[in-house]
Amino acid sequence: MNVYESMELTKKYGVCPECGNDKVGGEPSQGALIIQDEVFTRSCKCGWKVVIDRRIKCCAYMTNKRKGKTTGIYEVSIHGQGHKYLPLNDLKELAGVKRVNQTAKIEDWLNTTEGRKWALEVKPASIY
Ligand SMILES: [Zn+2]
């Protein structure tokens, strides 16, 4: 996520809504604030925790066979941008998967720097 988003989340969840603690780290730990790519995690010593997951997610896919060739679309949801149809064959090749139902592997690739860039920039696939 970008710096602006991380700052907004840090501000929003900086203080624990359960016990008012605003500290992280320390020994013993007062709480944690972790921003890893598109996942923001903030937890508190009292047990409160919030996870904001803004990774690209797979929603659905559709394939069809035409003249012996399988084509299709892969629908994903991208935070702040709604849903997008990705061209399935390109995606499979780029993500290195043979089968469309290898969702975890496809999602992993889509959330790499390279995959994310591709998903955001590629021309949306058409269903028809
Ligand atoms: Zn707390």
Image (cartoon, helix red, strand yellow):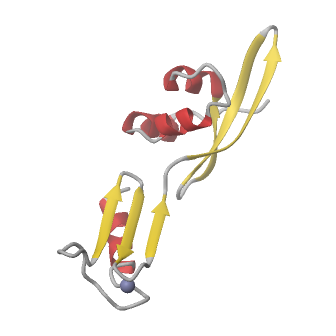
Instruction: Name the image quarter holding residue 111.
Output: top left
Q: Position of residue 121 (x, y in %)?
A: 49, 37
Instruction: Name the image quarter holding residue 20.
Output: bottom left
In the orientation shown, which residue stands out farthest toward the left?
27
In the orientation shown, which residue stands out farthest toward the bottom?
20
Q: Is the C terminus in the top left, top right, bottom left or bottom right quadrant?
A: top right
| Horizontal arrangement in the rendering, residue 15 relative to residue 116 (left or right) | left
Residue at 31% of width from left, 87% of height from top?
21
Residue at 39% of width from left, 65% of height from top?
41
Q: Foreground: 126 or 20?
A: 20
Q: Foreground: 76 or 126?
A: 76
Q: Is the N terminus in the top left, top right, bottom left or bottom right quadrant?
A: bottom left
Q: Position of residue 38 (x, y in %)?
A: 41, 54
41 above or below 2? below
Instruction: Tell which quarter ligand 1 is in.
Output: bottom left
Q: Position of residue 11 (x, y in %)?
A: 33, 78
Residue at 22% of width from left, 72% of height from top?
25
Count of labels in the image = 0
Q: Position of residue 109 (x, y in %)?
A: 47, 34
11 above or below 61? below
Q: Foreground: 21 or 52?
A: 21
In the orientation shown, which residue stands out farthest toward the front?
28
